[in-house]
Image (spheres, helix red, strand yellow):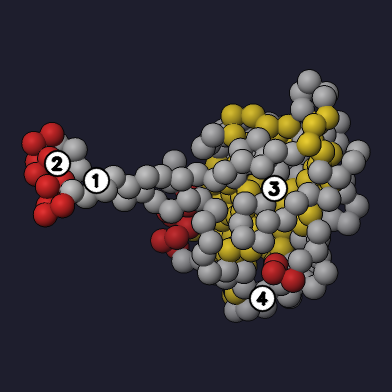
Amino acid sequence: MTAGCVMFASAACTALVSLDGLSGKVRDAGADGADGDVAKETGVVDVVPPPAFCAPAPGLGACFDFEDDAKDQSPNAFTPLTAQNVGFAQGVFGRAVQLTSAPVSYLLYPAAKSLESTSYTVEAFVMPTKLPAPTKRAGIMDTDSRVSAFYYDDATIHCRGGQQELVSPKIALDAWTHFACVWTPAGGTMYVDGVAAASYVGTGPSDGADSQLIIGGNLPTLDENFDGRVDRLRIWTVARSPGEVRDAARR
């Protein structure tokens, strides 16, 4: 299948369309505090909206909101080398990418210096729809020599950074779950729906030079494909705090 092309349920192949990220507007305050008077009379209070999901932030290496678009919405703007049999469906917020093992589907992105680090955070909403075959696993995302997240046949998510592995409790099929895996050179923590679920103390991931990124499979073989949906996937080259992870997990 040609790069930059996505296969929908209709089996029609069309170029990926770039959409704007989430945004919000702030109502202008009136002169001399007039807006405050209106708020008192009407009960309407200005609320500053949260930043757009993929807004530039220190350490944001890649961000995918999957609003009918597989392009990285971070300032790095990675475009898929290959979008194999990928579709979009209802997500937690708007749309999500739909992945299957039959036919094989995945998104493959180029290697990038901007994703090289020794501290990482990977976070996403996932909705698995099928368990891998017995003794098998399915790739949610993988950067090969850096960090990865796989869904296993026992319904757990395994996050690997270097030689260290973090394992979640069982993740339900056909339901949305937020997971986040945080690594530093001294250890790592996995969060499920904003709550710490596993941790280790020890060596973290290497900088993983020249590793590509795959969503929905395993590198470098492009197999072990995931059945389900993924929404709001972000890869950070910093270790996010527990509070930041909790905020990301809110729906």
Task: Tell me the crowding category of disc 4: few under 14, some 14 to 19, or many 20 or more residues within 10 angstroms, Cα based.
Answer: many
Label 3 environment density (alpha carbons within 10 Å; few <14, some 14–19, many ≥20): many
- At x 41% / y 61%, what residue is drawn? 243
Q: N-terminal of the two: label 4 or label 2? A: 2
Q: Secondary structure at mark 1?
A: loop
When the figure is inspected, residue 19 is found, relative to residue 113, above or below; the finding is above
Q: Which residue is mark 3?
A: 71
* Position of residue 59 measured from the top left corner of the image (x, y, whole percent): 57, 68
Looking at the image, can residue 19 be seen?
yes
Q: Which amino acid is tagged 3?
A: Lys
Q: Dividing the picture into quarters, in which one does residue 234 lie?
A: bottom right
Residue drawn at point x = 90 percent, y = 41 percent: 2
Q: Amino acid at mark 1?
A: Asp
- Quick one: label 3 or label 2, which is nearer the N terminus? 2
Can you identify the residue that label 1 sits on?
A: 46
Circle 4 residue: 118
Along the polypeptide, which appears first: circle 2 or circle 1?
2
Distance between mark 2 and mark 1 Cα atoms: 8 Å
Please tell me which residue lies in front, 172 or 78.
Answer: 78
